Image (cartoon, grey):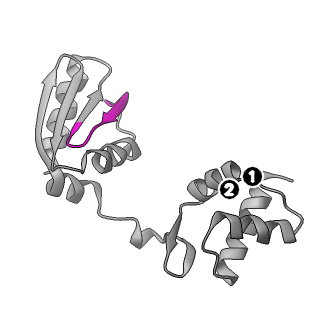
Amino acid sequence: MSKSYRQGQILKLIATKRIYTQDELAQELGALGIAAKQVTLSRDIRDLGLVKTAEGYRELSPSESGPDFGALLSEFLRDVRVAQNIVVLRTAPGHANTVAVAIDDEELADVVGTIAGDDTILVVAPDAEGALRLRESLLGKI
């Protein structure tokens, strides 16, 4: 049984039934002859971009994906500093992870990776020049 087939069946199930837990999802798949462990279902849910709602698991539509990158930076980014090839971002408390994920999702050329705390993000650039370009780019979006 392929991953794509299993994920297709998951999408069909959530479109036709209210499924509130991974256990319920595993039972429904089992009834279709598809055995899946919890870790596999967690990965499938993440890969498919499913969200848990009051009506059970649902696909997140593109319009529900959240604010655009610039709006996110404008709202939460407080300070941007450069130290060699590291860019240190300060955010509103509790929002560093959200901003770091958005930076990762943008797949910016000057970003090697991010590490987020509560209100601070370390962004690793390939070199000092890349860090400066990234700082200017981020500041230009807020």
Q: Secondary structure at mark 2?
A: helix
Q: Are marks 2 and 1 in contact (CB under 8 Å)?
A: yes
Q: CA distance from mark 2 to mark 1?
A: 6 Å
Q: Which image quadrant is residue 36 in?
A: bottom right
Amino acid type shown at disc 2: Leu
Q: Residue 118 in magenta?
A: yes
Q: Which residue is mark 1?
A: 37
**Residue at x 60%, y 74% (from the top left corner):** 20
| 35 relative to 21, above or below | above
**Residue at x 20%, y 51% (from the top left corner):** 73
| Magenta segment boundaries in residue numbering | 110-120
Where's residue 83, x and y in %?
Answer: 15, 20
Where's residue 58, x and y in %?
Answer: 56, 73
Left or right: where 111 falls relative to 37: left
Q: Which residue is mark 2?
A: 41
Q: Residue 7 in magenta?
A: no
| 59 relative to 113, above or below | below
Residue at the right extreme of this rendering: 33
